Image (cartoon, rainbow, N blue to C red):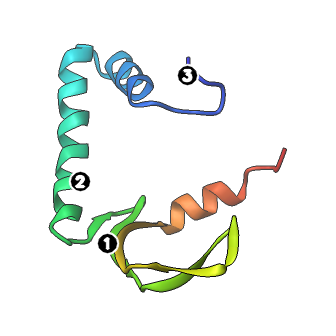
Amino acid sequence: MPEKPDCLTKRDLVIRIANETGLTQAEVFSVVQRVFDYIAESLAKGHRVELRNFGVFEVKTRKSRVGRNPNAPEVDVPIPARSVVKFKAGKEMRRDVLRITPK
């Protein structure tokens, strides 16, 4: 079903949910897109997003630091502080992922 063997896409989610619920793909797509939009909107405002039994999305600040140019290692390159999105999986997801046998 997935377009790529080891990748679940939004389209795959929509098709699967539509098949399981009897809703149209357009209806499911609208709801799924709205959920993603609300999560992104909350994160853009700096809010934490908690989804019980799934995980937590939050915005963290990476400190400024000095990097190196690989083509000119003697040159220091200042890297400014920036905001990044972090995800911490919930207990149930971590437990389920631990069951996966490495390939």
Report helix, strand or loop for mark 2: helix
Residue 75 spot, x, y in % from top left: 61, 80
- Residue hosting label 1: 59
- Residue hosting label 2: 40
Q: Which mark is residue 2?
A: 3
Q: Tell me which residue sits at (37%, 21%) in the image.
A: 20
Dot 1 or dot 3: first in sequence order is 3
Mark-to-mark CA distance, 2 and 1: 11 Å
Mark 3 residue crowding within 10 angstroms, few (<14) / some (14–19) / many (20+): few
Q: Which one is nearer the viewer's eye here, 15 or 81? A: 81
Question: Residue flagged by tag 2: what amino acid is it?
Answer: Ala
Give left or right: position of 93 versus 96.
left
Locate the N terminus and report the quarter of the image it occupies.
top right
Report helix, strand or loop for mark 1: strand
Mark-to-mark CA distance, 1 and 3: 30 Å
Question: Residue flagged by tag 1: what amino acid is it?
Answer: Val
Dot 2 or dot 1: first in sequence order is 2
Mark-to-mark CA distance, 2 and 3: 24 Å
Mark 2 residue crowding within 10 angstroms, few (<14) / some (14–19) / many (20+): some
Residue 6 spot, x, y in % from top left: 65, 33
